[in-house]
Image (cartoon, rainbow, N blue to C red):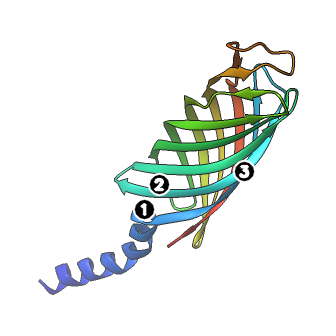
């Protein structure tokens, strides 16, 4: 009986940090690059909150700001991702699917309707103490309809924001 209690005590002490990182919440910031089909490349960043719900399953929520050129478009994405994370001590790969609501504003005389979209993602988390650095690739599927003519686009025409993106971010465990 003493051996069983000793082993259980040892395991509980060893697993406390792992449990905090697997089940805890983390928050941080990220920077991204995005190349949509119909526009020049975009750059942006934002804030992120992530949490491991149970087992390998987690959620990621983000709010950001992106700027695209030709035509000049500003975008505020609000996104949620369901993640499948494979937790290893230092480097943990993950995959995810998600969706979001995207608010747009354009250059003078040109605007886009707000839209919804979805994406698939894959990446790596690198855990360094209470910090986690993540690198992510994602393919975004998103179209926005031109609301006001401008930039060579006609009202009712769809701009295709679908394309590849890359993100680098840092989060802190609570």
| Disc 2 + disc 1, Cβ < 8 Å | yes
Q: What is the C-alpha distance between the residues marked 3 and 1?
A: 25 Å
First-in-chain label (2 vs 3):
3
Residue 105's image quarter?
Answer: top right
Mark 2 is surrounded, within 10 Å at the Cα level, by few (under 14), some (14 to 19) or many (20 or more) other residues, namely some
- Residue beneath label 2, please? 87
- Disc 3 on helix, strand or loop? strand
Mark 1 is surrounded, within 10 Å at the Cα level, by few (under 14), some (14 to 19) or many (20 or more) other residues, namely many
Q: What is the C-alpha distance between the residues marked 2 and 3?
A: 25 Å
Asked whether residue 60 appears in the rendered view, the answer is yes
* Whole-percent x, y for residue 14 in the image: 39, 76
Of 115 and 41, the residue lying toward us = 115
* Whole-percent x, y for residue 34 in the image: 75, 35
Vertical side of 147 occupied by 98: above or below: below
Vertical side of 74 occupied by 55: above or below: below
Which one is in front in this view, the residue at disc 2 or the one at disc 3? 3
């Amino acid at each position: 009986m003493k051996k069983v209690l000793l082993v259980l005590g040892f395991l509980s002490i060893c697993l406390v940090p792992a449990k905090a990182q697997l089940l805890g919440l983390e928050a941080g910031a990220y920077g991204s690059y995005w190349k949509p089909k119909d526009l020049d490349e975009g750059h942006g960043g934002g804030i992120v909150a992530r949490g491991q719900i149970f087992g390998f399953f987690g959620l990621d929520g983000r709010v950001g700001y992106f700027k695209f050129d030709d035509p000049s478009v500003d975008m505020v994405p609000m996104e949620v991702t369901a993640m499948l994370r494979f937790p290893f001590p230092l480097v943990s790969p993950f995959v995810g699917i998600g969706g979001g609501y995207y608010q747009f504003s354009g250059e003078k005389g040109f605007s886009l309707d707000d839209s919804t979209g979805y994406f698939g993602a894959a990446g790596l988390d690198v855990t360094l103490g209470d910090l986690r650095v993540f690198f992510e690739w994602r393919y975004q599927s998103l179209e926005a309809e031109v609301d006001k003519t401008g930039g060579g686009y006609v009202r009712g025409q769809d701009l295709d924001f679908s394309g590849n993106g890359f993100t680098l971010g840092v989060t802190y465990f609570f």
